[in-house]
């Protein structure tokens, strides 16, 4: 799939088929995240992959908008080192690049995904077991779409601000 085609068709998918991701697909998604650029090439990320239903159900409690994690084929938690309890400079950018790589790689393989915000970090830590000097603010869910048309249906009009509103040329 062409990159512009993937970006143009991409949408969030929250309803999935009840079947696991093919192992090669999951590995391709993880490799796409690993391959991302990062500030000073620090690669301050670890990915915790959850595919067992019990773990996915538990993760569906980490936030008010996480219910569909329970029905996903996989969730990948984006974990970053946070020795001082704060988010190191540029980490949000780095994690965003890794996440978007995974999202686009998945899309090119016919797999839908959705970012999930963690509102209960201590619950996420108990479920996922990452160390005290690490944090997790986002997960990604993945699965083959329950409605395969999700992969080709255009976004509803108005879902994105028009280019003329967003772009300022030369000066604001
Ligand atoms: C940083 C971030 C956090 C998000 N958190 C959640 C979430 O907790 N639960 C959820 O269902 N969707 C979440 N989303 C998905 C957004 O709602 C979605 O990207 C947005 O509505 C655009 O969807 P579309 O691409 O299908 O138009 C999040 C997206 C981003 C980028």
Image (cartoon, rainbow, N blue to C red):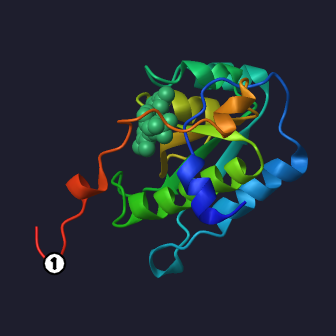
Circle count: 1
Q: Nearer the viewer, residue 28 or 7?
A: 7
Question: What residue is rendered at 60% in x and 32% in y?
Answer: 13
Q: Which residue is mark 1?
A: 170
Question: What residue is rendered at 69% in x and 31% in y?
Answer: 149
When the figure is inspected, residue 33 is found, relative to residue 158, above or below; the finding is below
Residue 46 shows up from this direction: no
Q: Quadrant of the C terminus?
A: bottom left
Q: Position of residue 57 (x, y in %)?
A: 66, 19
Q: Is residue 17 left or right of residue 89?
A: right
Q: Position of residue 55 (x, y in %)?
A: 70, 26
Q: Quadrant of ligand 1?
A: top left
The answer to which quarter of the image holds residue 93 is bottom left
Q: Is mark 1 within 8 Å of ligand 1?
A: no
Residue 53 shows up from this direction: yes
Q: Is residue 20 left or right of residue 38?
A: right
Q: Position of residue 157 (x, y in %)?
A: 40, 35
Q: Quadrant of the N terminus?
A: bottom right
Q: Nearer the viewer, residue 136 or 7?
A: 7
Q: Which structural element holds mark 1? A: loop
Question: What residue is rendered at 83% in x and 50% in y?
Answer: 25
When the figure is inspected, residue 103 is found, relative to residue 158, above or below; the finding is below
Question: What residue is rendered at 56% in x and 70% in y?
Answer: 43
Q: Can you name the residue that lies furthest to the left here?
A: 172
When the figure is inspected, residue 169 is found, relative to residue 87, above or below; the finding is below
Q: Can you name the residue that lies furthest to the bottom here?
A: 40
Other-residue count near label 1 (Cα within 10 Å), few / some / many at <14 / 14–19 / ≥20: few
Q: Can you name the residue that lies furthest to the right here?
A: 23
The answer to which quarter of the image holds residue 11 is top right
């Amino acid at each position: 799939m062409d990159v512009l085609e993937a970006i143009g068709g991409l949408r969030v998918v929250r309803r999935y088929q009840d079947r696991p991701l093919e192992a090669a697909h999951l590995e391709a998604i993880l490799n796409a995240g690993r391959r991302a650029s990062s500030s000073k090439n620090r690669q301050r990320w670890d990915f915790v992959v959850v595919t067992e239903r019990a773990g996915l159900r538990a993760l569906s409690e980490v936030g008010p908008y996480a219910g569909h994690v329970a029905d996903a084929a996989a969730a990948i938690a984006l974990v970053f080192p946070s020795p001082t309890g704060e988010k190191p400079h540029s980490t949000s950018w780095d994690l965003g690049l890794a996440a978007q790589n995974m999202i686009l790689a998945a899309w090119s393989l016919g797999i839908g995904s959705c970012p999930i915000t963690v509102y209960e970090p201590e619950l996420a830590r108990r479920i996922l077991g990452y160390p005290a000097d690490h944090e997790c603010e986002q997960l990604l869910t993945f699965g083959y779409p329950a409605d395969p048309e999700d992969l080709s249906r255009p976004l509803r009009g108005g879902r994105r601000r028009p280019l003329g509103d967003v772009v300022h040329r030369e000066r604001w």
